[in-house]
Image (cartoon, rainbow, N blue to C red):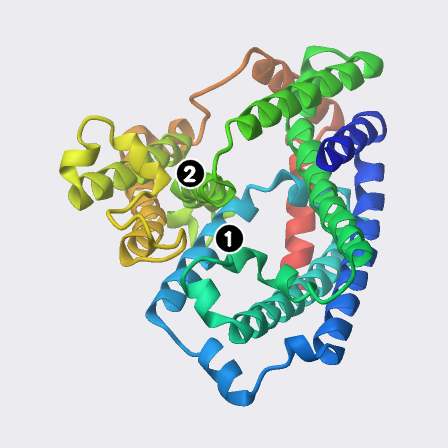
């Protein structure tokens, strides 16, 4: 019930106030995270129930093959998904300038790294206290740091629950705002009325929340859902972001055409389907897309463990990369530079925007789109810096 109220509150806030409110909640999130870290540090350092010997900690922090597989999977999965995180890109374009953006992302990366190290150590301490319970699944590893708080009174448990729920809700509002921002530019092409655009964004936000509530009611495993989303992102991460490479220069051969990028995404999806059929043909031959759930023959295997999952996350983006580069260069050879670089999939307003840019260029007397000229100048300044 608490989560529902928090969800309604943050959704309403983001629908009314937009990006500024999301940035405020991010700051509030940082303060709450600092409080949670401080509380955990005090509990671990002062409570005798949480003390472990060097031998116990050594057993909990040893190197394992499953740990290595999980590391590879997490790095590729999270990197692929975060590159598509529209909340991040929204903050890129909302930054004061390039220097401020680099400083913010640099400091944020360091803090996130330290935070992940902290919670990893907390998890190892919790496991070292009672390894048998975790090995037999009497206790769950993803709830390990909650076990460290058991010696505290019920009031502290309620406070931590509020902290954690608020942290989750604050992250969700950033994601929701980022998703709706993707459509804002298209809404601008449909109408020039700001009030109508605002309400269209709010309707989209409500639709996103309805879909999220429906899915949550179906009680899907959260980690499994994240892995499905990460794997889908891995199929398209290279085809999409290779498009940031300029079409001139020593890396121009990596810059995709639209057709090459599209076929690269298909190649990534095909790689997942092929891996599934090779792994277990009898299970996945009728519906190979089920392998996106990364189910294995061992039901007791953890969601981030196993060589099959690891190789799937390694091969999928590499396959999409190879297909994208090869098909883009074939496209350039067959259709030529000018035709291959033109978009294939267009919307009605694309021509409208092109005509507008052409008109501005002619009136400016430069013979070039002013927006493109400004972007090129900025890119050159950054490159020289």
Q: Residue at x 56, y 30 (%)?
A: 216
Out of 324 and 353, give the one closest to the viewer. 324
Q: Which residue is mark 2?
A: 232
Quadrant of the rendered image containing residue 14:
top right
Identified at 19% across, 46% down, the residue is 279
Q: In which quadrant of the rendered view does residue 157 lie?
A: bottom right
Picture coordinates of residue 15, whole percent (x, y): 79, 26
Q: Quadrant of the N terminus?
A: top right
Residue 188 visible in rendering:
no
Q: How much space separates mark 1 and mark 2, taking CA atoms?
A: 12 Å
Residue 175: numbered disc: none
Q: Residue drawn 48% across and 84% down?
A: 58
Disc 1 target residue: 79
Dot 1 alpha-carbon crowd within 10 angstroms: few under 14, some 14 to 19, many 20 or more: some
Instruction: Say which quarter of the image contains residue 110.
Output: bottom right
Q: Secondary structure at mark 2?
A: helix
Instruction: Specify the quadrant that holds the C terminus.
Output: bottom right
């Amino acid at each position: 019930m608490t989560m529902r109220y928090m969800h309604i509150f943050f959704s309403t806030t983001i629908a009314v106030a937009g990006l500024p409110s999301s940035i405020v909640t991010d700051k509030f999130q940082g303060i709450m995270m600092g409080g949670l870290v401080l509380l955990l540090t005090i509990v671990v350092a002062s409570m005798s129930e949480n003390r472990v010997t060097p031998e116990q900690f050594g057993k909990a922090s040893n190197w394992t093959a499953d740990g290595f597989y999980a590391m590879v999977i997490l790095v590729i999965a999270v990197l692929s998904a975060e590159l598509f995180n529209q909340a991040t890109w929204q903050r890129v374009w909302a930054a004061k300038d390039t220097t401020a953006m680099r400083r913010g992302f640099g400091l944020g990366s360091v803090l996130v790294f330290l935070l992940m190290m902290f919670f990893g150590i907390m998890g190892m301490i919790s496991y070292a206290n009672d390894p048998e319970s975790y090995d037999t699944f009497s206790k769950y590893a993803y709830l390990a740091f909650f076990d460290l708080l058991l010696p505290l009174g019920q009031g502290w448990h309620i406070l931590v629950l509020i902290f954690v729920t608020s942290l989750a809700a604050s992250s969700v509002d950033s994601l929701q705002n980022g998703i709706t921002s993707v459509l804002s530019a298209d809404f601008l092409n449909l109408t020039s009325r700001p009030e109508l655009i605002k309400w269209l964004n709010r309707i989209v936000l409500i639709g996103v929340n309805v879909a999220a509530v429906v899915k949550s009611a179906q009680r899907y495993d959260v980690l499994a859902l994240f892995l499905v989303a990460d794997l889908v992102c891995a199929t398209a991460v290279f085809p999409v972001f290779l498009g940031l490479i300029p079409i001139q220069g020593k890396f121009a051969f990596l810059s995709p055409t639209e057709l090459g990028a599209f076929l690269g995404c298909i190649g990534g999806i095909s790689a997942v389907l092929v891996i599934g059929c090779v792994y277990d043909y009898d299970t996945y031959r009728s519906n190979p897309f089920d392998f996106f759930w990364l189910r294995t023959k061992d039901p007791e295997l953890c969601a981030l463990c196993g060589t099959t999952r690891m190789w799937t996350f390694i091969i999928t983006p590499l396959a999409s990369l190879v297909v994208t580069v090869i098909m883009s260069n074939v496209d350039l050879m067959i259709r030529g530079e000018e035709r291959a670089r033109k978009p294939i999939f267009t919307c009605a307003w694309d021509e409208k925007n092109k005509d507008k840019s052409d008109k501005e260029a002619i009136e400016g007397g430069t013979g070039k789109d002013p927006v493109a000229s400004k972007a090129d100048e900025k890119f050159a300044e950054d490159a020289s810096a």
